[in-house]
Each structure stands twice: as structure tokens, then as C-alpha cells.
Image (cartoon, rainbow, N blue to C red):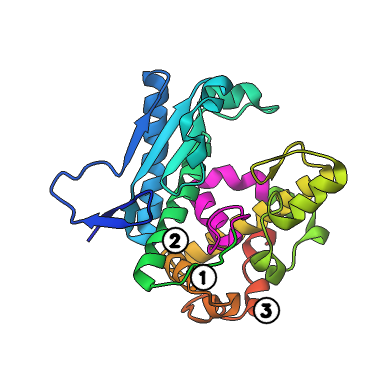
Amino acid sequence: MLLFVSCTSDGDHKSERRSAQPPKPYTIEVVPDEAERVFTVQQLEQAYARFVEMFGVAPVLRVFVYDTEEAMSQSPLLAYANHPSILLFKSRRLIQSQSVSPIPGEFSVLAHEATHKLVMSMAELLIHYAGVNVQGRRLDTYGHALAPDWLEEAVAILAEKPEEGAQRLEYLRENPGDLIPLRRLLEMDHPYSGEAAQRLAASLGKELKGLTLLEPPEEMLSLARMYYGQVHALGHYIWETEGPQFFRTALLAAVRGEPVDAIFASAQRIPRTIEELESTYLASVFE
């Protein structure tokens, strides 16, 4: 049974049975033109298809697409940018115009970012039904405070088309001496965010936008490239070996506060210890 779940502003959750012709689990607003709307729909369908395979539900998402920086900066919704069901997104043209290396027209950047929001909504849903006490949870986090950054990023990467990760994996092959130990990868904050980014920003006198360091230094970029490459490899390894359902199990364990070792201890097909997993998940990358 597929559920359509809405996370309201006060944190309540509603669900309804799927009908013969269910409504789309997303709405698209402030779209510049029809071509942008078609692209946005394609990206959201791509994101939802993968997400439902992993989690079995389709959280409701409101996507606001802007064609200028000024329009986006004036949006009254910016106050809710961290709301799990609202995604503010620059149009494809605006992203391409700001990119040093133009993003291919079919690059899954919107599908990736939409999936981050879906993970946030899913975490809120699991908190509600698992009866998790969220008092005192951190607010200075990359994504959802109770969702490990590696897990959220892996799910978002899996929403992309597989071929888009080729450059990430090539970076791993070119820099094997810089690999992040797996336990650290699973426990660390996202390289661009968290306390480490805040400390680095302060030391460099640079600006933080939200929790993301603007114009990050090369050492942070190098760490981020390695982080994304390894999370890409780990996510695809889990998907292909353990199966997509693992991600729902892992997220539920995480919001309950279980340690990373416990998350993998329930695996059926991949190694159940971090040490054993470390020696297997990169095998296909370096073979």
C-alpha cells in the first residue's frame, strides 16, 4: 500500500489510502515557463520513483522554482526553507548560468535536492510513529538532525541517473591515498556543514550561507569530492547487494538514536560490521 504523507507546519502528519487515480504527491509553483515545468516534473518523477522503492511512501512536497536570484531572495517562504516539505529551487537556466562547468540539461540536480527534502519528511514521519523524543535535538545540521549525513546523501545520490556518478568514482581511483576511513565517513558531518565548517569559516573570515561555506577552500573541496565519491559507492553497493529496503530500516534506526554499528548489524547480505564492510564496498570501484 502506498501512502501519501503530508507534514504540516505544526508537525502533524496525515495519510490517506491510495485511490485509483491518486493525486501527485507534489505541487510545483512559481515556474517561469512550460519547458521548466516539464523538466521539473521529470526530475520529481525520477526522485519519487527511487524514493518509493526505498521507503514505500511518497511524502508531499511543494517545489518553488525561481528564474532569478532576486525573485528567490524576496520569497516569503525563505523563512521556511528548512521545512521538510518545502523546496526552494533555482531554475535549470539559472543554475547553468552560474556554473563554471555547464550542467548537462538532464543532470539530476533537482531530483537530488528534492530527495533531501523527502528524507527530511520521512524522518519526521518515522519520529511521529516511533514515538521518538526529539527535545534538545541539534538545529545546526546539514539535513535532518536525526538523519546521518551519509545516509541522507546516499539516498539523494541514488535519485540521480547512475552514469552521473562516473566522475565521483574516477576521483576515488585517482586519489586512493585520501580515502576517508569508513567509520569516520559514517559518523562525520557533511564536509560543507556542521561545526567543522563553522570553525573553518570563522578562521578564514569567510561567510556562511545557511550552513554552507561560500567559496570553500581547496582542502574542503577535496574532502567533499572524496566524501561524495565514497558515499556514492557505498549507496550503490547497499542498493545492489542488500536491497533498497535497507535505507528505510537504517533511517528508522537512526531516528531512534541507535549507533551506526547497530544500523548495519541487521543487514542480511552485506557485511554486518564496519570493519568488514570497509573492505568490500569499494571493491567494484578499484577492480
Residue 254 circle label? 1
Q: Amino acid at mark 2?
A: Ala
Is residue 39 shown above or below 270?
A: above
**Residue sitting farthest toward the left:** 20
* Quadrant of res 30: top left
Per the image, label 2 sits on a secondary structure element best described as: helix
Measuring from the top left, give residue 147's x and y in whole percent: 53, 62
Distance of label 3 from label 1 (alpha carbons): 19 Å
Asked if the residue under mark 1 is in contact with the one under mark 3, i.e. CB atoms within 8 Å, the reply is no
* Quadrant of res 132: bottom left
Q: Amino acid at mark 3?
A: Glu
Quadrant of the frame with the N terminus: bottom left
Asked if the residue under mark 1 is in contact with the one under mark 2, i.e. CB atoms within 8 Å, the reply is yes
**Sooner in the amino-acid sequence: mark 3 or mark 1:** 1
Please name the residue that numbered disc 2 is placed on: 123
Is residue 231 visible in the rendered image? The answer is yes
* Quadrant of res 204: top right
Q: Amino acid at mark 1?
A: Ala
Please name the residue that numbered disc 3 is placed on: 275
Measuring from the top left, give residue 214's x and y in whole percent: 73, 37
Residue 164 belongs to magenta span: yes
**Sooner in the amino-acid sequence: mark 2 or mark 1:** 2
Question: What residue do we see at 64% from left, 77% from top?
Answer: 274
Q: Which residues are magenta?
A: 139-168
Distance of label 2 from label 1 (alpha carbons): 9 Å
Is residue 219 visible in the rendered image? The answer is no
